[in-house]
Image (tube, rainbow, N blue to C red):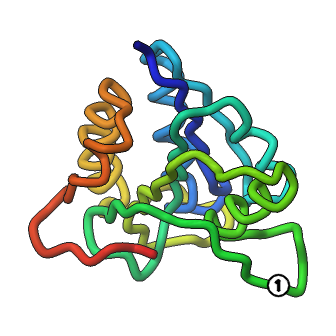
Amino acid sequence: MTRRLVVFGIGNPSRGDDALGPLLLQRLEQARLPGVVTVEDFQLQIEHAIDLQGRDLALFIDAGEGTPAPFSFAQVTPLFNPAHSTHSLAPGAVLAVYGQALEQAPPPAYVLCVRGQRFELGEGLSPAGRQHLEAAWDFLRQLCTEPDPERWSQLRPLPGLPPLL
């Protein structure tokens, strides 16, 4: 049975290592894996809850400045986090919006956060960002060829990495 997976690539390709999420998403799109749907945006918004409908599993990919190198991978749960704006949400808040709006549990969801170092406007990827991109791609490719929530819940990309959320 092919699981229906939605993968969000979050980031601004014009801001250095913030491009890591969209770059990984592009590679995933080129792989054309069955059952995988991709969504790219600069930031998560409440409307992204709709993209979770009909999915068995969700993955949010983003760059993080304080993330352990080369990346972290962790399950995320619904968490309503009131913010001053609905134009930029954490993955847990998108899951909470889904549950509230559709009155049902969202699909199991995970975050792959890739360590970034430079986020300046107009910059390209940093040398470290390129290395982290390659490490994250190897891991992402394995995840998406076997999109199984039970298997994913047991994964730890590198020994000793703390969970992201």
Q: Where 78 falls versus 41 (above or below)?
A: below
Res 151 → quadrant: top left
Q: Where 33 falls versus 40 (above or below)?
A: above
Task: Give me the residue at 42% from left, 68% from top.
Answer: 116
Image quarter (top left, top right, bottom left or bottom right) of the N terminus: top left
Determine crowd level at label 1: few under 14, some 14-19, many 20+ residues with C-alpha closer than 10 A: few
Asked whether 145 or 19 is in front, the reply is 145
Query: Badge 1 is on which residue?
Result: 83
In x, y percent, where is residue 117? 42, 73
Farthest residue, direction front: 103
Q: Secondary structure at mark 1?
A: loop
Q: Where 79 falls versus 105 (above or below)?
A: below
Image quarter (top left, top right, bottom left or bottom right) of the C terminus: bottom left
Task: Give me the residue at 46% from left, 58% from top.
Answer: 111
Q: Where 65 falls versus 135 (above or below)?
A: below
Task: Give me the residue at 30% from left, 28% from top.
Answer: 146
Left or right of 20? Residue 47 is right
Task: Give me the residue at 47% from left, 13% from top.
Answer: 34
Left or right of 39? Residue 125 is left
Res 97 → quadrant: bottom right
Asked whether 46 or 124 is in front, the reply is 46
Asked whether 84 or 81 is in front, the reply is 81
